[in-house]
Amino acid sequence: MEALILAAGLGTRLRPLTNDRPKALVEVGGRTLLETNIRRLTAAGATRIVVNVHHFADMICRFVAERQWDVPVVISDERALLLDTGGALRHAAPLFSGNAPILVHNVDILSSLDLNKMVEHHTHSMNIATLAASHRDTSRLLLFDHQGHLAGWTNRNNGETLWANKPLTAYDTLAFSGISVIDPSLPTLLPEADHPYPIIPEYLRLAATHTIGCYLHNPDQWIDVGKVEALEPAAKLIANQR
């Protein structure tokens, strides 16, 4: 398994902490989000980790270069253009071997999910992508059919709904957790990375002809460190892992 840590974002929800640093270098429990996730992914068996950069890119590059890691950690440079989650994955594709599943992980997500089990679930399922998700109260929801396959997405605030194929009348609604495992072939099926685009619409496009599944987890195992008020509960979550 190889991994991509999405760390290029502007971190606007974490201001003022991100006024002078990228969100990847915000500390939780005495360790940066980036280091925590590199260690987690390495422990889960990642043999190579790619980190994309844009906002305060030099700081992340220096942080990575000045430390010794147990596996190669390489940079996918988006300083010229912030590519969003879909464009980032396509842009980073040449940095992977093309022979192993890729675990895609947002840098501002901390969890106690068993990532080994998630990768094993993905491998046995033969999905082209497997998305970590849980039952949480959020405005944007993934829609899965009775077989647990991705069928759509909805925004409850404005009623916008996208479907992979025809609309369903019965489905399960789950919140995406910012962690995916994808087949190494998937990045080559994405549009060229000459413009920014998000990954969820691309997952839906691919779901029309490929199987994209779900890895259901307990929401108590997961936290989005996107806001300052999440730092304290996030520190408690990771303290239990050390």
Image (spheres, helix red, strand yellow):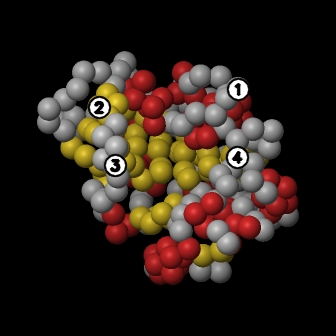
Rendering quarter of residue 37: bottom right
From the viewer's side, name the closer residue of 131 and 228: 228
Residue at image coords 67%, 29%: 195
Q: Are marks 4 and 1 in contact (CB under 8 Å)?
A: no
* Residue, far left: 170
Say which quadrant the N terminus sits in.
top right
Q: How crowded is the residue under tag 3: few (<14 C-alpha within 10 Å), some, or many (20+)?
A: few
Q: Is residue 37 left or right of residue 80?
A: left
Residue 220, placed above or below residue 101: below
Q: Can you tell which of label 3 and label 1 is closer to the viewer?
A: 3
Residue at image coords 53%, 45%: 103
Q: Which mark is residue 157?
A: 3
Residue 67 visible in rendering: yes
Q: Can you tell which of label 2 and label 3 is closer to the viewer?
A: 3
Residue 228, placed above or below residue 149: below
Q: Which mark is residue 194?
A: 1
Q: Earlier in the sequence, mark 2 or mark 3?
A: 2
Question: Disc 4 marks which residue?
Answer: 52
From the viewer's side, name the closer residue of 175 and 63: 175
Q: Position of residue 93 (x, y in %)?
A: 66, 31
Q: Mark 4: which secondary structure?
A: strand
Rendering quarter of residue 160: top left
Question: Disc 2 marks which residue?
Answer: 151
